Image (tube, helix red, strand yellow):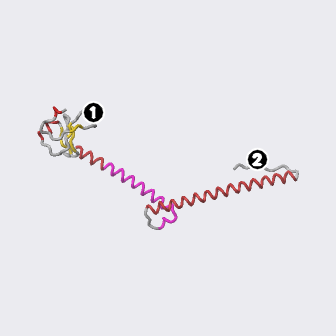
Amino acid sequence: MASHVPANYPNPTVAPYCSSPVVVHHVMNINSAMLGATGFSQSPIGMKRRFPGDSDDNENGCPIQVAQTQRRKESHNATEQKRRQKINDKMNELKKLLPNCREHSVDKATILNEAIDVIRKYLADTEAWQARECELKRMNQELMDENDSLARAAGLQPRRQGKCSE
């Protein structure tokens, strides 16, 4: 490895992520003679390995990595803006469903707190209605059993076909 590095090349290191040893220099101010001798060039994000036919500029004259980075940022920003818009749309939809949030301007935390309160209330109401339904089914079964026993005592055929399921 040392035979590829000029004697005046300061602080060479081996990049651990490469399959073959590659000399990487961490200082950006290297003269062009040293760059040509090692096969490395400066780029906006540090040193990069040069290959035959590589160009540092795209058709607009911008460095390729800068243009790629800019496109990634723009794509990320657009995706993030769509995500935020979806969240805002759903928050507005939720706000319209909540009785205490419909008429005045409220922040997202208030909308979420109100939604939690309403959901908890509905869960408690549902549990109470289920308990009441169970109690009514039990009472209905007792009345049906009593009706059957009275019908038998009077010598009549019971009117119901089977027991009510719970």
Residue marked by disc 1: 19
Q: Quadrant of the N terminus?
A: top left
Q: Residue 74, image x and y in percent?
A: 30, 50
Residue at the disc numbered 2:
162
Tell me the crowding category of disc 2: few under 14, some 14 to 19, or many 20 or more residues within 10 angstroms, Cα based.
Answer: few
Overall secondary structure of the magenta stretch?
helix
Tag 1: residue type?
Answer: Ser
Residue 8 lies in the magenta-colored region: no
- What's the amino acid at mark 2? Gly
Q: Which mark is residue 91?
A: none
Judge whether 36 appears above or below 138 on screen: above
| Residue at x 13%, y 36% (from the top left corner) | 6
Q: Helix, strand, or loop for circle 1?
A: loop
Where residue 43 sits in the image (x, y, percent)? 20, 44
Q: Residue at 18% across / 43% down in the picture?
A: 42
Q: Is residue 34 left or right of residue 165?
A: left
Q: Secondary structure at mark 2?
A: loop
Residue 90 falls within the magenta-colored stretch: yes
Q: Which residues are magenta?
A: 74-103
**Furthest residue in direction bottom, as rendered:** 104
Q: Which comes before the other along the chain, label 2 or label 1?
A: 1
Q: Position of residue 38 (x, y in %)?
A: 16, 36
Left or right: 144 in relation to 83:
right
